[in-house]
Amino acid sequence: MVSHAAVPPAPRRLLAIKLADLGDVLNITPALRALRHSFPEAHIDVLLNPHTTALLQNSALANRVMVFPKVQYEGLNVLWPWKWPGLIRYLSMLRRQGYDTVVDFHHLTTPLGRLKQRLLIAATGAKTTVGLDNGHGRWFTHAVRDDGFGAMPEVGYWLALARRLGAESTDVSLDLPVAPQDEARVAQMLSAADLRQGHFVVLHPGSGGFSLARRWEPAKFAAVAAALWQRWHLPAVVVGGPHDDAGAVLDRATSPMTDFSRRTSLGELTALLRAAALFVGADSGVMHMAAAMRTPVVAIFGPSNHRAWAPWTPDGHSEVVRLGISCSPCAYVQHSVAWRHGCPERTCLADLDAPPVVAAADRLLSAVLS
């Protein structure tokens, strides 16, 4: 049952919680902007996992970015008694912050996840708590109904939480600041590689470590790069981490391709994405970073839910490419994680060839380069 309590008092000290990955954090930034716009005098802290804090360190949307010690207290780790003294100290620290309002930017999907969220929120002592209710969130003082993954985009859910507090903003774009030093460093890298700003395509063959089932075949990325070189004379730049299949794409290249994988910080990757003419990649945090940069995005989806996590581009251009077979999406559907790693065959990606991706890229490039 969803709370129908009146709009609560304007927050003075607010904690926003998002313990997830890069793209998930970017998707809460429109809601954070609404909170900042509507409550300019409020102190707003954001609690993140360690690997995502850089996204908001230079953002005007948060007064402070706080770190949740994910490795120590994630999952079953919290059940071990020798972890409790540190956890108690951490929760005591949260209580001392004096938050009057907490916004929980999560779906209450798994029992352990629900336990963690409720423990963190109870520790703050906040009188106003806002979150999604899928049948497990009746303890929020002000809840928004959760109709399941993909019933609306993730950004839409988070904006609904902000509205539950009376917060609105006309700007609903993603927020990702670019530091001048990162722009300067990327300009040097592009010059050294004989690449020009706005005249190259970024390929990201990875999908992060959370689900390798989202990945498309390296040979098909190389085929897309070759087609875009032939049609638009745009060379490709490959980005990613040490396990993102960049080497496999480069090994299959038949057109100009530069390896920037493992060479950029998160800030430099942001600047590189803004300098690109087009981004092509699977569902990943890097895809959402490209969308935040308003770079045209071709997003390749298979098992994951495109209705929830398609690139959010209200002021830009993007296309989702997928086969649309009846069993896809199979991960994060309704209120369940379901097939997080897809099925063994992964037909939804195995049978998706390069031509539909090239066609989507052609349409986007025609709009921005013609």
Image (cartoon, rainbow, N blue to C red):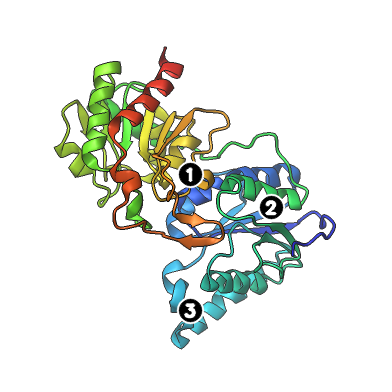
The residue that label 1 is drawn on is 306
Location of residue 325 with respect to 16 vertically, above or below: above
Location of residue 85 with respect to 48 vertically, above or below: below
Q: Residue shown at 78%/62% (left/top)? A: 3
Question: Could you tell whether 9 is left or right of 182 in the image?
Answer: right
* Residue 318, image x, y percentages: 47, 31
Of labels 2 and 1, the one closer to you: 1
Q: Earlier in the sequence, mark 3 or mark 2?
A: 3
Label 1: which secondary element = helix
* Residue 39, image x, y percentages: 75, 47
Residue closer to the observer: 181 or 82: 82
Label 3 Cα neighbours within 10 Å, binned few <14 / some 14-19 / many ≥20: some
Q: Are dots 3 and 2 in contact, CB under 8 Å?
A: no
Can residue 206 be seen here? no
Location of residue 310 with respect to 294 vertically, above or below: below
The residue that label 3 is drawn on is 78
Label 2: which secondary element = helix
Q: Residue shown at 43%/73% (left/top)? A: 72
* Residue 41, image x, y percentages: 75, 48
User: Which quadrant is home to the N terminus?
Assistant: bottom right
The residue that label 2 is drawn on is 161
Of labels 3 and 2, the one closer to you: 2
Q: Compute the Cα span from label 3 to label 2.
A: 28 Å
Residue type of the residue flagged with mark 2: Leu
Q: Earlier in the sequence, mark 3 or mark 1?
A: 3
Of labels 3 and 1, the one closer to you: 1
Residue closer to the observer: 223 or 104: 223
User: Which quadrant is home to the C terminus?
Assistant: top left
Residue type of the residue flagged with mark 3: Val
Q: Are dots 2 and 1 in contact, CB under 8 Å?
A: no
Q: Earlier in the sequence, mark 2 or mark 1?
A: 2
Label 3: which secondary element = helix
